Image (cartoon, rainbow, N blue to C red):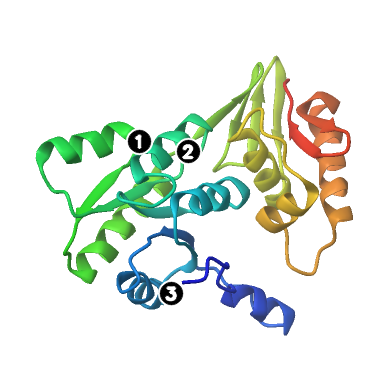
């Protein structure tokens, strides 16, 4: 099966003038040639799904795009599912992950959860159960009120507000908040302009839009909040 990213319905809608696709983005990392097409079809009703046929492609996808939730098979070629989950957690990816596996012993489940997965579904499974578990993961994740530390300040994701460091709270616009969150969730990682354009902005925007919003963040929060890595892109700084 091809490892190309399936086109997002929302991107096509935006190009023809329709409303953007508001469905959550989901990354499916599954190498089973029979199961993967079925899951793509079923999950595609409620999610914008990208498919990766092995752990290495899955790692690349997860580190270069933003997903609300991930479904990862445990027994993957190239990079094993447990190693993939552990690597993503070590790289600062905090989005909820559901593991699929044919191994259903208690020890296997504990191993998967300890690697960083939030849930664990044993094959064969009922599609309705998988969908319900994904809804529960997204609900728990959205009901949380994450706060990200940026130096001496705190970024309150839901309220789009930066507080601390002896200054009044600073409110951000939606795009400013999403850009700051994308950078801050992976400290130390350098994002290229195309990566930020894909993760944060609309399909019709240009790379100059990324520079404009970096300028907006610096104007509100100080130049130190975003670091320019010359020839590469941007990473989160400190305040």
> Would you say the residues marked 2 and 1 are in contact, meaning their CB atoms lie under 8 Å apart?
yes
Q: Please give the residue where the numbered disc 3 appears in the rendered image.
A: 44
Q: Please give the residue where the numbered disc 1 appears in the rendered image.
A: 116
Residue 19 quadrant: bottom right
> Would you say the residues marked 1 and 3 are in contact, meaning their CB atoms lie under 8 Å apart?
no
Q: Is residue 16 above or below residue 103?
A: below
Mark 2, other Cα within 10 Å: few <14 / some 14–19 / many ≥20: some
Considering depth in this image, is 28 or 3 the residue closer to the camera? 3
Helix, strand or loop at label 2? It is: helix
Mark 3, other Cα within 10 Å: few <14 / some 14–19 / many ≥20: some
**Circle on res. 88:** 2
Considering depth in this image, is 178 or 162 the residue closer to the camera? 178
Residue 110 coordinates in the image, percent (x, y): 19, 35
Considering depth in this image, is 11 or 2 the residue closer to the camera? 2
Is 116 on the left or on the right of 231, as rendered? left
Is 14 on the left or on the right of 142, as rendered? right
At 42% from the left and 57% from the top, the residue drawn is: 29
């Amino acid at each position: 099966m091809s490892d190309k990213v399936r086109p997002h319905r929302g991107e096509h809608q935006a190009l023809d003038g329709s409303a953007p696709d508001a469905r959550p983005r989901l990354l499916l990392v599954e190498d089973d040639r029979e199961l993967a097409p079925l899951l793509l079809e079923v999950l595609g009703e409620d999610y914008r799904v990208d498919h990766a046929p092995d752990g290495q492609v899955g790692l690349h996808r997860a580190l270069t795009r933003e997903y609300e939730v991930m479904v990862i098979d445990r027994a993957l070629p190239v990079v094993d599912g447990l190693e993939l989950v552990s690597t993503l957690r070590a790289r600062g990816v905090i989005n909820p992950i559901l593991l699929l596996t044919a191994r259903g012993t208690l020890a296997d489940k504990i191993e998967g959860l300890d690697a960083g997965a939030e849930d664990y579904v044993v094959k064969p499974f009922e599609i309705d159960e998988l969908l319900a578990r994904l809804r529960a993961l997204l609900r728990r994740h959205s009901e949380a009120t994450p706060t990200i530390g940026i130096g001496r300040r705190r970024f309150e994701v839901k309220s789009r507000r930066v507080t601390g460091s002896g200054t009044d709270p600073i409110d951000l616009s939606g795009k400013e908040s999403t850009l700051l969150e994308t950078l801050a969730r992976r400290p130390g990682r350098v994002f290229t302009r195309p990566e930020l354009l894909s993760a944060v902005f609309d399909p019709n925007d240009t790379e100059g839009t990324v520079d404009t919003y970096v300028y907006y963040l610096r104007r509100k929060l100080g130049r130190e909040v975003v670091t320019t890595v010359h020839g590469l892109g941007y990473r989160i700084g400190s305040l």
